[in-house]
């Protein structure tokens, strides 16, 4: 029976460390680290994420700059705001909450963010450096996954890791981070054949698909570590991408949904803000 990885508790512990370090930064530099969060429109899920990010900042002694813009905001206005935030010395990190309303061009907006303030790690410069194994701001969800493995003493070296999902924000960077730690990686996606057999071969399974309980419990190898990134709103509540009860019987360690990867993501955003702040003053 698998041990459940408690993302809330790990997150609480990490936030204590971030608070302490943000306090040290404030004392040394006469200002706290600063995170600007930009939300365009009224999407209810995005509004909750933005509120949680603001609350996280307050909890950790990071100054948050909230920019809540109307749905009617033009591309030009949004780019002008990014330029202002890029030039503002009190702002160390800039996060544009996605998805943007359909009339705005996400790619151009993300490209406009100064890579030194790219705390989401979505800028091609950050992604390129990650691919080359150079120090950079790393996307928050994959960083959270690595943190959870480390805290549970799981060394990916020599392990077979199967990542299901190849998005730029989760699947690809998670695979790169696991490879950098010497796991042998297999990246699966919607055209992968015999997914069940691939999952059954994995010592570490990372599911980032967006389909409730798609990975069946009986596919999981006895003793595998299962990281479920999925967040799927269903009539029965929030569900992961893994059939939790079945997988828990076979896994050695498993993340629940909710309470697993989710809480770690915002915590890593706060940590990335601290990392960006330190790099900017050094
Ligand atoms: P995404 O961009 O939609 O990517 C989904 C990936 O899953 C794609 O690579 C897709 O393959 C693959 N896929 C879809 N159907 C499949 C199938 N039948 N078999 C195998 N692979 C399949 O999603 P994302 O942004 O990476 O997010 C994935 C999930 O994680 C979502 O539930 C999202 O809400 C959640 N999420 C959670 C957090 C958190 O903090 N907990 C953060 C980010 C995302 P193709 O490339 O072939 O289309």
Image: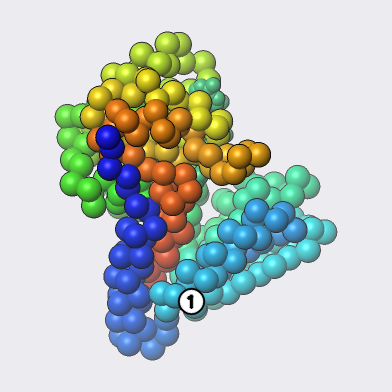
Residue, x 66% and y 69% (percent of image)?
A: 67
Residue, x 30% and y 28% (percent of image)?
A: 250
Residue 142 position within the rendered picture, expressed as x and y whole percent measured from the top left: 39, 45
Q: Is residue 280 visible?
A: no
* 62, above or below 171, in the image: below
Question: In which quadrant of the rendered image does the N terminus lie?
Answer: top left
Rendered image quadrant of residue 157:
top left
Rendered image quadrant of residue 22:
bottom left
Residue placed most toward the observer, 96 or 43? 43
Give neighbour class at mark 1: few <14, some 14-19, many 20+ (Cα, 10 Å). Answer: few
Count of numbered tags:
1
Residue 8 position within the rendered picture, expressed as x and y whole percent measured from the top left: 39, 58
**Residue situated furthest top in the rendering:** 194
Residue, x 37% and y 20% (percent of image)?
A: 219
Secondary element type, mark 1? helix
Residue placed most toward the observer, 220 or 101? 220
Colour scheme of this structure image? rainbow
Residue tagged by mark 1? 58
Q: Is residue 26 visible?
A: yes
Residue placed most toward the observer, 157 or 35? 157
Residue 15 position within the rendered picture, expressed as x and y whole percent measured from the top left: 36, 68
Question: In which quadrant of the rendered image does the C terminus lie?
Answer: bottom left
* 190, above or below 282, in the image: above
**Residue situated furthest right in the rendering:** 72
Residue 59 position within the rendered picture, expressed as x and y whole percent measured from the top left: 44, 75
* 73, above or below 56, in the image: above
Rendered image quadrant of residue 216:
top left
Mark 1 residue's CB less than 8 Å from ligand 1? no
Residue 154 vs residue 220: left or right? left
Residue, x 54% and y 70% (percent of image)?
A: 54
């Amino acid at each position: 029976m698998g041990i459940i990885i408690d993302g809330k508790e790990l997150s609480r512990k990490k936030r204590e460390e971030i608070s302490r370090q943000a306090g040290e930064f404030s004392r040394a530099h006469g200002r706290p680290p600063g995170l600007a969060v930009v939300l365009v429109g009224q999407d209810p899920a995005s509004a909750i994420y933005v509120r949680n990010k603001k609350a996280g900042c307050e909890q950790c002694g990071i100054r948050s700059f909230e920019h809540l813009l109307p749905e009617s905001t033009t591309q030009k206005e949004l780019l002008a705001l990014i330029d202002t935030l890029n030039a503002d010395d009190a702002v160390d990190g800039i996060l544009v909450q996605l998805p943007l309303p359909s009339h705005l061009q996400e790619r151009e907006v993300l490209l406009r963010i100064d890579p030194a303030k790219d705390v989401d790690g979505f800028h091609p410069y950050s992604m390129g450096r990650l691919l080359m194994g150079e120090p950079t701001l790393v996307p928050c969800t994959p960083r959270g996954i690595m943190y959870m493995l480390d805290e549970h003493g799981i060394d990916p070296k020599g392990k077979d890791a199967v990542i299901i999902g190849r998005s730029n924000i989760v699947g690809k960077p998670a695979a790169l981070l696991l490879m950098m730690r010497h796991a042998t990686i297999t990246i699966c996606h919607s055209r992968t054949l015999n997914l069940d057999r691939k999952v059954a071969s994995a010592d570490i399974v990372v599911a980032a698909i967006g389909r409730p309980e798609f990975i069946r419990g009986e596919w999981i190898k006895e003793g595998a570590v299962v990281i479920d990134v999925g967040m799927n709103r269903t009539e029965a509540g929030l569900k992961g991408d893994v059939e939790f009860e079945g997988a828990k019987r076979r896994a050695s360690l498993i993340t629940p949904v909710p309470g697993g990867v989710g809480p770690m993501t915002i915590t890593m955003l706060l940590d990335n803000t601290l990392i960006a702040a330190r790099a900017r003053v050094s």
